[in-house]
Image (cartoon, grey):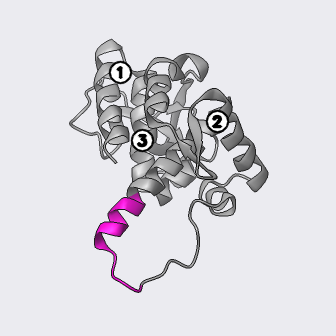
Amino acid sequence: MKSQDILVLLKWVSLESQELGALDRARPGVAVSFDPFSVRELGQALYISKTEISESLHRSVDAGLAIRSHGRIKPNRRNMLEFMIHGLKYAFPAKKGATERGIETAFAAPMLQGDLISAGSEIFVWPFAEGKARGASVTPLFKSAPQAALQDALLYEYLALIDAVRLGNQRESKLAGQKLEHRLLQP
């Protein structure tokens, strides 16, 4: 497994959730001109090559974090959740750095403010030149995660929750894990 595999799976989950929402609002006769689940579209959305996306999906199937269903690879949400809550911070530990400008993550992310409380007033950011916040830098799960998260609010939320699990003390990690469970298992 590589850290980008988690990013690819979370993007897939985000797309599935968005697709369900779009189906609820869809009008008859409106056709989608592209397949957001294609390797090409996933690669463009995540700033990762098509080859890497394909290899990532195969690694995820081998690890049990995705399954093959009707010729299509799909995330195995329950296995993903278990790995993200119990194994991710050990396999891909969060690396804290100096104060930098960036995009808020973990407890400081806009969608989590007020929900998760960190000990102290320190906020965490992914280093990103176009970010507006200043805080302790945290290496993102994958180098293109901040850029991809700015294009997809749901992906941003998943990544921020994962960082809260990776960075938090036991209480914060548990609360972030519960929120992640609710989001992943309630499409």
Q: Which one is in front, 95 or 63?
A: 63
Q: Which residues are magenta?
A: 18-29
The amino acid sitting under disc 1 is Ser
The amino acid sitting under disc 3 is Tyr
The residue that mark 1 highlights is 173
Find residue 184 and name its label.
none
SS under mark 2: helix
The x, y position of residue 93, in whole percent, is 56, 21
The x, y position of residue 13, in whole percent, is 47, 48
The residue that mark 2 highlights is 61
* 156 left or right of 38 in image: left
Other residues around mark 1 within 10 Å, as few (<14) / some (14–19) / many (≥20):
many
The x, y position of residue 34, in whole percent, is 58, 73
Let me know if residue 163 appears in the view. Answer: yes
Q: Could you give the CA–CA distance between mark 2 and mark 3, rounded to whole angstroms?
A: 20 Å
The residue that mark 3 highlights is 158
In the picture as drawn, the residue positioned furthest to the front comes out as: 70
* 83 left or right of 50 in image: left
Residue 50 vertical placement versus 77 (above, below): below
SS under mark 1: helix
Residue drawn at x 49%, y 60% is 151
Q: Which numbered mark, 2 or 1, is in the foreground of this view? A: 2
Residue 120 belongs to magenta span: no
Q: Which one is in front, 184 or 62?
A: 62
Residue drawn at x 29%, y 72% is 25
Residue 150 vertical placement versus 32 (above, below): above
